[in-house]
Amino acid sequence: MKKLLCSVLLFGASTVVPAHALTLELDGNLASTSSSSSSWQGDMSARLRHGIPLFPNVGITAANRSQGDAFDGSRVQFELFYNLVESFAWELDLGLAYERWNADKKHLAGVGSGEQLYASGRFSWLFPASNLGVMADMQYPLTHEDFKREQWRMGLSYRFNEHPQLTFNAGFQWEELKTRWANNDRSGPFMGVNLRF
């Protein structure tokens, strides 16, 4: 898996789309993967896209989780990614990221914090002659020591305008979280907003 991912990233570095203007992308998501009405989790991301061949784009994400289990807490992620496909209707990003997690309930999780490397990916496609489309994103762990988190989202998107580009996403999220003492997988609805300048 790691060799395949490296091959894809190297291929992407050599075939990245032509350079375009510097773009700042802000992304916010809110999800509930627990039956309790008071449970939630949210994340906010900032990604800088420059379009310079060979140099990866950069991103940072801050997230908080309050789902009433051992994995409640906060995390910070740092990402390097390539924009492999970009057009009006299609987009595909692939990258590598580092994540640091801090537990609110150390006595349940068995550890107070953890870290991992993971593969990241985002995909979107607009239906022909429409502002409605589909989207998906994933975070797939490449390491597993004291902490492991895997997450997949998929759903529908609607693009309201182009300049700045404002998109609303809504769909379904699945996640699996593990430490040496605890194991949990949950799923539920999410919604999000994406804004590009």
Image: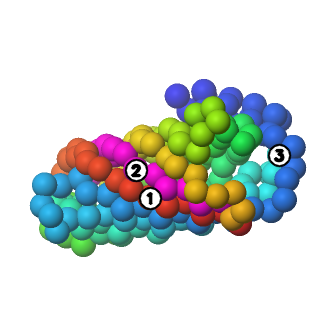
Question: Mark 3 is on which residue type?
Answer: Leu
User: Is residue 163 found inside the magenta-colored segment of the image?
Assistant: no
- Per the image, label 1 sits on a secondary structure element best described as strand
In the rendering, at what x and y percent does residue 190 appear?
34, 53
- Give residue 54's mark: 3
- Give residue 48's mark: none
Check disc 1 and report the residue beneath it. Answer: 192
Pick the front one: 81 or 111: 81
Q: Is residue 176 above or below residue 25?
A: above
In the rendering, at what x and y percent does residue 123 appear?
57, 39
Q: Residue furthest bottom?
A: 104
Distance from disc 3 to disc 2, alpha carbons, whole Å, reads 33 Å
In the rendering, at what x and y percent does residue 75 appear?
41, 66
Residue at the image position 60 percent from the left and 27 percent from the top: 4
Whichever of callouts 1 and 3 sits on the residue coming sooner in the sequence is 3
Residue at the image position 50 percent from the left and 47 percent from the top: 157
In the rendering, at what x and y percent does residue 37 appear?
15, 64
Pick the front one: 197 or 96: 197
Answer left or right for 134 relative to 151. Answer: right
User: Is residue 173 found inside the magenta-colored segment of the image?
Assistant: yes
- Magenta span covers which residues? 165-179
